[in-house]
Structure formats: C-alpha cells, structure tokens
Image: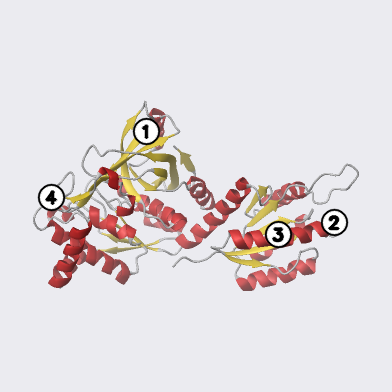
Amino acid sequence: MKKKLNVGMIVTLSGRWPRELPEKRYREYGEWVETHLADCQVHRFARVICTKSDMDECIDEFRQKGVELIILVYGAFTGDDVCCGFADALSVPLILWAPREEAWEREDRLYANALCSAAMNGASMMRIHAPHHIVFGNKEEARVEKEIKTIVSAYAAVKNIRGLRFGMFGYRPTAFYNCAFDEVTLRRTFGINVEETDLKVVFDRMAALPEEDVRVEERRAAELWNTAELPEGHLENHARLYLVLKELMKEQGYDFATIKCWPEMGNLHTTPCAVLGRLADEGVHIGCEGDMDAGVAALVQNVLTDEPTFITDLINLDEQENTVTFWHCGNAAPSLHDQKDGVKMCNHPLAGQGTAFWCSLKEGPVTAARFTNIDGQYRLFLLRGMAVPTVRNTRGSMVNVKVETPVLDLVREIAENGMSHHYSLVWEDVAEELEQVAKLLNIPVVKL
C-alpha cells in the first residue's frame, strides 16, 4: 500500500497589507489543494498566517502532523521570516506559490505583489540552503496545475521508494557486465534495501508444488492464451514458476525484484518471460536479466503511475518515420498487448526454452527511462515518445515508438553517454515527474 505524502498548506501576508485578498485566497486555494491533491494527506492551517505567533502555532501543528512538504500561497507580500522560519523549524521543502495580480486599477494600490515576494523569499531560501520551488500563476491555469502536481508527485514517489525491499532471484546473466550494480551506491541514492534468494530455492519450490495446483494453473493459462505452439512440458513449467514466484515475493517481503533468467532457467526449460508479464498485471513486479538499475527505473515509473512496465531493448530505428523499435523476448504484461495483431504464448523466441508472449504492444504515450551508475554517480536517461500501431515482424514482444529527437542523434547520445541497453517503458507521459524525482535525489538527467 502506498504511503501518503503529508502536505501542509498555508496562506501568508505581512502585517501592513490588506487582508481581504489573502482571506479570499485562503478559501479558494485551500479548497483547490484539498481537491486536487486528494492522493496526499493535506493539512490546511486554520487561518491566514500574518504574525510570528501564527507561524509558531502552525509550526507546532505541522510538526505534530508529520508534514513533509509545505505549499505556501502568497495572500499578499510576505517577508523572508516566514518561509525561512518554517524551513529552519521543520527542515521540509516549500513550494512558494505566487498567484497573478488581481485586476489592475490605475489609481488603486498594489494588493499582493506575490511574484516579487516569491523571488525575494526564494533567494533567501537558497542562501540558507533550504529546498524550495517557485510556481507562478493562478490555480485555474493548466500549466500551474501540472507544475504543482509534478513537484508533489515527485516528493511522494521519493517517500515511497525509500525503504523498499528489492529482491534478487539469482544475480546477472553470464557476460552481462552492464547488469551489475553497486549495492551501497543504490542504497545511498535511493534508500532501497537489496536482498537475495538463490535460484535453487525457486527450483526446489517448483518441484514441491501439489500436482493438482499445477494442473489447475495450466488449464487457466491455456484458456487465456493460445498455447498450441508450446513444446511439451513448457506450460507445466510456466504454471509452476508463476505460482512459486508469486508465493516467494510475498514470503520474502519483496516490493520489487529482478531475476537471473538465463542460462540456468533456460537449461531447465523454464525461461520466465511470460510469467513476468502476467505477474506485472497483478502488481508483482520482477525485472528480467538481473538488471537492477533498469528495475529501479521500472519501480519509480510504477510508483508514479500504478501501471505495469516493460523492460526492453532498443533494437532498430527508422529515419524516415523517426521511430525506434523496442523489443524483448516476451515479458510484456498482457494489459500492454495489442490484440489486433494477434497474441500467443510460445517458447522463448531466441533460445526456445520456457514461455514468452509473441505480440505487438498497444498505442499511446510512453516514457522510456533507465538509471545507470557510472563511476559511482547515477544518471537518469529519459526519452518520451508515442507508441504507434505496430505489426510484429519477429518473435517476441515489440512496439515502434515515434520520438522527437532525430533517431540518429538519439543513437549518438546513447553511445556518448554510456547508456546501458535496457530501458523501462511505461504507457504514460511521466517524463517531467521522473526528471523532478531525479532532481530531488541529485541525479543528473540525460534527455535522449
């Protein structure tokens, strides 16, 4: 279950400014925050903050509520003492939200001066090294809503990442050096705990399953997908592995995991591609080929969207259409399949060992991402695009994605920056949210 971010909401002004507009913004912007940030636990202070006693009372209340992020809306011009006071006392980031000025009257006074105040406050926050974000514009503006929600979503994602338990079933496949990872750097950067379960545990549990449970699962899979081309025994192994991985993920308390899917699993005719896809649609997330860093990208995407992800290779490009082809052995979740092009569960498309989905994937906006550790510093590689109608032209799971960057330039960027070969795709445009998460974790972003 996701942990809700505790968000404090305040409206402020300095004492010499009229209170009518701040009171109006307290009502209207307070209601907006409570409505539009429904996934958070919002704590709105009971009145507009003007005096030091107001601020001290609010600080005590927010401390008791465990507030982790404050949205400060400028009712009117506010001195540096308020934002710095909250930052010093609570050590939490602030969003300094400056609505636009009210309708101008030639002979009337200035009633808010919010943008000036936000700039001044932000400069002071920077000098004391207090994390903050400045947003300018009214609550009715789509851009403003997007900015606020992107920042809040990123903080919520970071909260939900930290402390997660990432399991490893085995390590990495033979000669896949780029799937190796640094556990200490991973924990220091993301706050993720890593634990390992040997593949022998998986195989032993598969062998010990009650035969009737296996037969029931075999029949269920055969009813859901075309399995006519599977070699003898592969569907049985599929059923056994599906049942065991679901059990082990729960027993070990793994929030996410990776698996060494070859060569041992292939040698036993139980390569897990189709199993991983099925589990992803059930909220059980296991990345393939032991690639922990690609798995972390998938984890963040899932935390942001609650959608399954697709760990994949970029295997081809088309300069005329400016598309790239993402393909992998057959691990795409069924909810991502394009039924119009036909779907079947076959053996592994390269090695012929185990089960895999042979299909094209659905249309829609996608975000491709990968975290890569280079010399002890993580980088986020980020690409957005549009999945277009795709006809499968080889075995496995695949989709063509139209991108903005000229595809040959994209390949050069990949080569020059040391991008590893796995990406995680999610069928939503969350590029801005991922970039904001990276900024909060002090991770440089490489936009492809």
Label 2 vs 4, first from the N-terminus: 2
Q: Residue furthest left?
A: 232
Marks 2 and 4: which is nearer the front?
4
Residue 290 location in percent, x, y? 28, 53
Q: Relative to 47, does residue 287 appear above or below in the rendering?
A: above
Q: Which residue is mark 3?
A: 28
Whole-number angstrom distance, CA of label 4 to CA of label 1: 31 Å
Question: In front here: 35 or 326?
Answer: 35
Nearer the camera: disc 1 or disc 2? 1
SS at mark 3 in the image: helix
The type of residue carrying mark 4 is Glu
Which sits earlier in the primary sequence, circle 1 or circle 2?
2
Of the numbered discs in the image, which one, if any, rests on residue 229?
A: 4
Is residue 240 something that shows in the picture? no
Q: CA distance from mark 2 to mark 3?
A: 19 Å
Given the image, on which type of amino acid does mark 2 rest?
Answer: Trp
Question: Nearer the N terminus, badge 4 or badge 1?
Answer: 4
Q: Quadrant of residue 53?
A: bottom right
* Residue underneath mark 1: 323
Q: Which residue is mark 2?
A: 17
Alpha carbon separation for disc pair 1 and 2: 56 Å
Q: For the residue carrying disc 4, how many other residues have a C-alpha within 10 Å: few (<14), some (14-19), or many (20+)?
A: few
Q: Is disc 1 in contact with disc 2, using a CB cutoff of under 8 Å?
A: no
Q: Nearer the viewer, mark 3 or mark 1?
A: 3
- Lower sequence index among marks 4 and 3: 3
Q: Counting other residues with Cα less than 10 Å from the Cα at mark 1, is it few (<14), some (14-19), or many (20 or more)?
A: many
